[in-house]
């Protein structure tokens, strides 16, 4: 029986800024790029009360919350804190799969101590050593643990035991499943589907007919089925950054500011992979109808001009359809491929 924990830091970047500058506490705070034309990287809970969210354009956040305090992004500081937190994880397990600087999966299946007890101790050590809080979800697989970690935020945890999964999933709103956003929820509601239990009425053939390959994946997700392992030593094939917009963007010019903001973060992330060779640059778009496209070009270094070209190419493929998600990234050259080329 697997024991998986998902640890999610609470408003990580904003919480670090509040710790560094206590005068920010109690105020709505947003961490953003150097330009007010960019997007919020994150917002603290006070700012979220006004509707401010990560990936929201800064100008819109200021319209919702004129008293919002904007602080610049400091990735080096956030990376250092993330390393400290991952070192704490390493005291309890070697099976750690980081998802980003502020969240990770841990496989505690080898421990005799209940996973919930270990998760509580990890959270306590994070608080004591960094002054930051974390939330945790505990479950028999990654899907369940991820959903559970959002159940008792901030600074809390929630466990879903194996014998509770079936009942839990039946009552779970379908919007809690990854990949099911506002448009998909609306589409499912026309079918009388609001909970995972409602969705479970459809068999695999029906799901495939309605939603294609995604339907087969959704058939498993709505039942809490997830066989993915916690992968701690996989070779990264790519590094990317994605934003799902709170409202669909309908103009190419509106996509440029969030793209450049994501490129800043991508450049910071690549510092940790300076031993890898970049093979190509990638722009990914998902449209309002959930179709998607990926524009890619071979290039060995980050180049904002090429990303502009790829953005325009992806947008043109969508023929003006509203965009719900934008991603930028790089693909790495396979280390084995490099060795073979050198031998040749």
Image (tube, grey):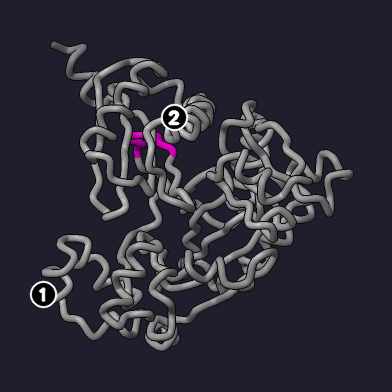
Between residue 251 and residue 226, name the one nearer to us.
251
Q: Residues within 10 Å of mark 2 (few under 14, many from 20)?
A: some
Answer left or right for 165 relative to 29: left
Query: Whole-percent x and y of residue 47?
Result: 71, 53
- Res. 92 image quadrant: bottom right
**Whether residue 236 can be seen here:** yes
Whether residue 19 appears in magenta in the rendering, the answer is no
Please tell me whether residue 62 is drawn above or below residue 150 in the rendered image.
Answer: above
* SS under mark 1: helix
Q: Residue at position x 28%, y 34% from top?
A: 315
In the rendered image, the quadrant that contains the N terminus is: bottom left
Proximity of marks 2 and 1: CB atoms separated by less than 8 Å: no
Whether residue 238 appears in magenta in the rendering, the answer is yes
Answer left or right for 116 relative to 296: right
Please tell me whether residue 309 is drawn above or below residue 212 in the rendered image.
Answer: above
Query: Whole-percent x and y of residue 340?
Result: 18, 19
**Number of the label disc, if any, that sits on residue 256:** 2
**Number of the label disc, if any, that sits on residue 341:** none
Please tell me whether residue 239 is drawn above or below residue 206 in the rendered image.
Answer: above
Q: CA distance from mark 2 to mark 1?
A: 40 Å
Please tell me whether residue 136 is drawn above or below residue 1 in the rendered image.
Answer: above
Between residue 45 and residue 343, name the one nearer to us.
45
What residue sits right under mark 1 in the picture?
Answer: 205
Q: Earlier in the sequence, mark 2 or mark 1?
A: 1
Q: Residues within 10 Å of mark 1 (few under 14, many from 20)?
A: few
Which residues are drawn in magenta?
235-241
């Amino acid at each position: 029986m697997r024991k998986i924990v998902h640890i999610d830091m609470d408003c990580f970047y904003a919480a670090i800024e509040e710790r560094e500058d206590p005068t920010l506490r109690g105020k709505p705070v947003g961490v953003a790029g150097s330009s007010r034309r960019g997007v919020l990287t994150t917002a603290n809970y006070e700012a979220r009360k006004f509707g401010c969210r990560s990936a929201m354009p800064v100008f819109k956040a200021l319209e919702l919350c004129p008293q919002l305090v904007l602080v610049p992004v400091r990735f080096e500081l956030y990376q250092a804190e993330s390393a400290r937190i991952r070192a704490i994880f390493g005291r309890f397990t070697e099976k750690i799969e980081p998802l980003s600087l502020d969240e990770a999966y841990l496989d505690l299946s080898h421990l005799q101590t209940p996973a919930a007890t270990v998760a509580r101790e990890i959270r306590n050590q994070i608080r004591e050593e960094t002054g930051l809080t974390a939330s945790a979800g505990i479950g028999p697989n990654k899907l369940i643990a991820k959903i559970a970690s959002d159940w008792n935020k901030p600074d809390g945890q929630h466990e879903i035991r194996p014998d509770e999964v079936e009942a839990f999933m039946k009552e779970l709103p379908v919007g809690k499943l990854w990949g099911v956003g506002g448009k998909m929820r609306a589409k499912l509601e026309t079918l009388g589907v609001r909970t995972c239990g409602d969705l479970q009425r459809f068999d695999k053939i029906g799901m495939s007919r309605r939603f294609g390959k995604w339907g087969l994946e959704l058939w498993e997700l709505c039942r809490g089925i997830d066989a993915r392992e916690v992968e701690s030593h996989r070779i990264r094939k790519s590094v990317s950054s994605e934003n799902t917009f709170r409202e669909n963007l309908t103009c190419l010019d509106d996509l440029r500011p969030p793209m450049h903001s994501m490129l800043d973060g991508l450049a910071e992330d690549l510092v940790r992979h300076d031993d890898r060779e970049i093979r190509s640059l990638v722009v990914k778009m998902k449209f309002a109808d959930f179709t998607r496209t990926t524009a890619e070009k071979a290039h060995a270094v980050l180049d904002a001009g090429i990303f502009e070209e790829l953005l325009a190419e992806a947008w043109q493929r969508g023929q003006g359809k509203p965009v719900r998600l934008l991603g930028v990234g790089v693909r790495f050259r396979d280390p084995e491929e490099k060795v073979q080329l050198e031998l040749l």
